[in-house]
Image (spheres, grey):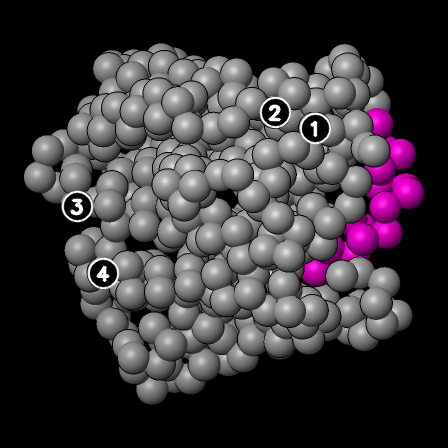
């Protein structure tokens, strides 16, 4: 037997998986609430506009730190306790952000709630642990659907709540949700006590070995890193295009566009079912190609000033990104359960670097070459991933 307790397989209720999906989505959403609220927050707390985007960056820094320092502990300590700790951490940071009246306080709060938002990446391995092997793809896909829904719905939800109740209400509402999830998951989750007994430093020290010895991990990072980079590139640049003269959208119009694009979250559930039927390889190829096609459709929409085509391109891209994430996590979770949390932490942390690159180049690309430069970069990234995928021997990366 491997190093983790596998006894809960198949014993969890649908409500338990729903709460895990909700926790994943709500945790991921914490990282994106501030994006459409930067102007409101900076004006209220006295933050200079030239560094206002740091309110988002600091949350991401906290998240990456949590990925590396907290998520691996899922292989070492009782998982319900880990859920409670990270949710309470997120709750504390969100309350501090809601009450902040200075840039320094808000900055510290952003790091704290970003750190606690890794609940999303504690939930996914736990869902894999609870599911029976024959349904693991579907159950993981459902939880990842929640995660992707949180990412996609955070911006329009924050804009609408702030419009009616102010920006502070966004963070307070999320804090209440974190507290409710901490209580609900404590009551419903079965205990999981990993048997490895490794210290945090031993867990962190095992990362290079895992990268060297796990070819499935390396492959899946190579597929998802450009995918997530292209995904973030699109959603960072598209508000600039929508607000420009060709479309003339205001903030509420951009929020509605993001809401329409969120239909892509259904790709997670579909991908999970395909993976359980043994179609991960085909699905991965379709996802990588689909992302490139999504950029091409969006470029046609811009060329003809067609909102419908731009929405279709966004949905296709989102479907591809969500599906590829599920194929990757399902492949990793079919490996040794004793290392699941560390595999997931490495996978997410490294492809988030792709997302950081996508957000970093979005504005310069758009300024230099408009939407067509953005589209070209997205297509090139996905074609490169497809080229690498073509070198994969059949059956080597489930």
In the rendered structure, the answer to whether residue 252 lies left or right of residue 117 reads left
For marks 3 and 1, give the one nearer the viewer. Answer: 1
Q: Compute the Cα span from label 2 to label 4.
A: 41 Å
What residue did someone put label 3 on? 160
Q: Quadrant of the C terminus?
A: bottom right
Q: Residue at x 56, y 61 (%)?
A: 272
Q: What predominant SS class does the magenta segment belong to?
A: helix
Closer-to-camera residue (273/239): 273
Q: Is label 1 in a helix, a strand or a loop?
A: loop
Q: Compute the Cα span from label 2 to label 1.
A: 6 Å
Sooner in the amino-acid sequence: mark 3 or mark 1: 1
Closer-to-camera residue (391/19): 19
Q: Compute the Cα span from label 3 to label 1.
A: 43 Å
Q: Let me know if residue 212 is in the magenta part.
A: yes
What x and y, as percent, mark residue 358? 56, 53
Q: Residues within 10 Å of mark 3 (few under 14, many from 20)?
A: some
What x and y, as percent, mark residue 337? 74, 37
Q: Using the rendered image of the protein, determine whether residue 187 is visible from the camera's viewpoint.
A: yes
Q: Quadrant of the N terminus?
A: top right
For marks 2 and 3, give the one nearer the viewer. Answer: 2
Q: Residue furthest left?
A: 164
Residue range in magenta is 206-229
What residue did someone put label 1 on? 5
The reply to whether the C-beta atoms of the residues labelled 3 and 1 are less than 8 Å apart is: no
Q: Which mark is residue 192?
A: 2
Q: Using the rendered image of the protein, determine whether residue 46 is visible from the camera's viewpoint.
A: no
Q: Is label 2 in a helix, a strand or a loop?
A: loop
Q: Residues within 10 Å of mark 4 (few under 14, many from 20)?
A: some
Q: Compute the Cα span from label 3 to label 4.
A: 10 Å
Q: Which mark is residue 256?
A: 4
Q: Let me know if residue 128 is in the magenta part.
A: no
Sooner in the amino-acid sequence: mark 3 or mark 4: 3
């Amino acid at each position: 037997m491997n190093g983790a307790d596998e006894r809960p397989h198949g014993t969890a209720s649908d409500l338990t998986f729903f709460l895990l999906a909700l926790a994943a989505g709500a945790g991921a959403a914490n990282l994106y609430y501030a994006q459409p609220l930067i102007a409101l927050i900076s004006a209220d707390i006295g933050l200079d506009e030239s560094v206002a985007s740091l309110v988002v960056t600091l949350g991401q820094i906290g998240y990456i730190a949590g990925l590396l320092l907290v998520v691996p502990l899922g292989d070492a300590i009782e998982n319900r306790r880990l859920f409670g700790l990270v949710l309470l951490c997120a709750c504390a940071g969100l309350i501090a952000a809601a009450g902040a009246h200075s840039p320094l306080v808000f900055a510290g709060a952003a790091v704290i709630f970003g750190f606690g938002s890794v609940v999303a990446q504690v939930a996914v391995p736990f869902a894999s642990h609870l599911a029976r092997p024959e349904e693991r793809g579907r159950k993981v896909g459902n939880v990842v659907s929640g995660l992707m829904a949180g990412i996609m719905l955070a911006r329009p939800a924050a804009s609408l709540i702030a419009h009616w109740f102010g920006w502070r209400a966004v963070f307070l509402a999320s804090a209440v949700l974190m507290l409710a999830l901490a209580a609900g998951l404590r009551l419903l989750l079965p205990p999981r006590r990993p048997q490895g007994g490794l210290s945090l430093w031993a867990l962190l020290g095992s990362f290079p070995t895992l990268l060297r010895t796990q070819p499935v991990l390396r492959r899946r990072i190579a597929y998802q890193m450009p995918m997530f980079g292209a995904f973030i590139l699109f959603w960072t640049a598209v508000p600039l295009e929508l607000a420009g003269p060709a479309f003339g959208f205001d903030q509420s119009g951009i929020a509605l566009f993001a809401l329409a694009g969120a239909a892509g979250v259904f790709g997670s559930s579909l991908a999970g079912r395909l993976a359980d039927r043994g179609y991960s390889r085909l699905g991965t190829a379709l996802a990588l190609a689909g992302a490139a096609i999504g950029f091409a459709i969006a470029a046609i929409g811009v060329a003809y000033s067609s909102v419908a085509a731009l929405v279709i391109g966004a949905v296709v891209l989102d479907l591809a990104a969500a599906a590829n994430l599920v194929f990757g996590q399902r492949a990793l979770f079919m490996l040794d359960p004793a290392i699941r949390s560390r595999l997931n932490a490495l996978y997410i942390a490294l492809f988030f670097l792709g997302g950081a690159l996508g957000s970093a180049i979005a504005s310069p690309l758009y300024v230099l070459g408009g939407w067509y430069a953005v589209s070209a970069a997205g297509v090139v990234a996905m074609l490169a991933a497809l080229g690498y995928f073509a070198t994969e021997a059949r059956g080597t990366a489930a």
